[in-house]
Image (spheres, helix red, strand yellow):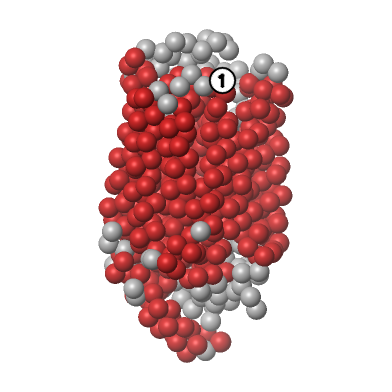
Amino acid sequence: MKNTSLTRCLAYAFSDTGGQLVFCVISFYLLKFYTDVYGISAASAGTILLVARVVDAMDAPVWGIIFDKTHSRWGRSRPWFLWLCVPFAVFGVLTFVTPALGYNAKVLYAALTYVTCSILYTGINTPVTSILASLTSSPAERITFTTFRMFGSKLGVLVVNLTALNLVRYFGRGDDRRGFLIVMLLFAAGSVLLFLFAFWKLDERVSETQAGGSIRQSFGAMKGNWPWIIIFVSSLFFWVAFISRISISAYFWEYTLHRKDLIGLANSLDFASLAGILALPFFVRLTSKRTVWFAGLAGAVAAQFVILHGIRTGSLPVVMVGWVLGILLSGIAMAMPFSLLSDSVDYGEWKSGVRAAGLLTAVGAAFCLKMGSGLGGALPAWILDWSHYAPPVGQQPVEQTAQALFGIELGFIWLPAACYALAAIPVLFYHRFERLEPRIREELALRRTAVPVANKPL
């Protein structure tokens, strides 16, 4: 039976589209929503973003253990698409509800709704990664599935960025609070439908001989798992860079370039990253996973300096070239770890005898995404507060000081560039483990065929 049928690949793609329809709005626009629509200071907003993600990141190992302990007729990862899609959608909407409260109560409400939404996102998004190890045992097919997943992710980002702000203006008719609420209701409904489609069409085909061991055994799959450690460290810095860049981008286009009209278009260009992602199987066959991964991160650093050159010379075309290059190359750097995590699960099973797919992917993907996103959202917000950013008065923007403009540049150019560079360093050491993959696959296949059927977990 072919593992990578078009239906299964599309179902896997739509599992990430469903998550992005809600969480992309949060990643791209929540900071600006808090400061410019809901009336929360940049310092308070940054603290909310960090505290929420730190709390949420702590639940990643818990989710991972729960997934490894899950036993159902639908498998270990797949049922969570069904069980969590509605709660996730509901709290995605509540995050953009703006009750008339006192300032402290507003901050508390924002924190509670955002924390809950983030926790549920971890619960429904981590299985998108952990299920990959159960969809196929072939590294080549995992690259194919990951490519489709990235297509689905970028499709969700494209839909949000092409339509969200326009729909907010259309439905809000001057009232952005009302506009954001209606838009989130629409996106949340679409998210539920896509997760249900993924649940319907995906099935788990790889038997797991040692999945669901004790908690101590599951954590033992991390010990000495250097491929996973490399993925963890690099991913953490990557998400700080990526989220800081996009969370402050709206301020950059509006105040640095005075082109607020380009915000939606610029963010929608994220879809261009598919050009690199779709070529991943070719790139990996041509060279190696390590080389492709490192090139994506190093190129993302270079793209930041292209944008800086465009700012210094006052050239919008150069800025746009740097922006698109950053999108293309960071997309490659984003996609590689999701595929490699399944290989690190194999490595952990090979070394320890325990296949802890849920825990390794929860910590290696969800924890890094959450903690990195928390820092990536908080650091630019704190920089804005330090530089005395002035939010709009009503619908009228305020002229920013030179210090505020420097703060926007610091958060948009220099912070992402530094973190992309830090993410690239551990990747240089990945090649020695990549060379072991054929041996690991062969030995694991022999172990699995040697396990009597009666002893295999249900």
When asked about the image quadrant of residue 380, the answer is top left
Residue 127 spot, x, y in % from top left: 55, 58
Q: Secondary structure at mark 1?
A: helix
Q: Please tell me in which quadrant of the rendered image residue 38 appears.
A: top right
Q: Report the quarter where the N terminus lies.
A: bottom right
Is residue 34 shown to the viewer in this render? Answer: no
Residue at point 71% right, 49% down? Answer: 193
Query: Eyeballing the image, is 20 above or below 224?
Result: above
Q: Amino acid at mark 1?
A: Val
Q: Which residue is mark 1?
A: 37
Percent from the top left, x then y, of residue 37? 56, 20
| Relative vertical location of residue 264 with respect to residue 127 in this rendering, above or below | above
Q: Nearer the viewer, residue 117 or 108?
A: 117
Q: How many marks?
A: 1
Residue 280 seen from this side: yes
Position of residue 419 measured from the top left corner of the image (x, y, whole percent): 32, 42
In the displayed structure image, the side of residue 15 where residue 360 appears, left or right: left
* Residue at screen point 70% across, 56% down: 197
* 179 relative to 389 in the view: left or right: right
- Assess disc 1: are there few (<14), some (14-19) or many (≥20) residues with their C-alpha within 10 Å of its C-alpha: many
> How far across and how far down the image is residue 25, in percent?
57, 36
Quarter of image, res 407: top left
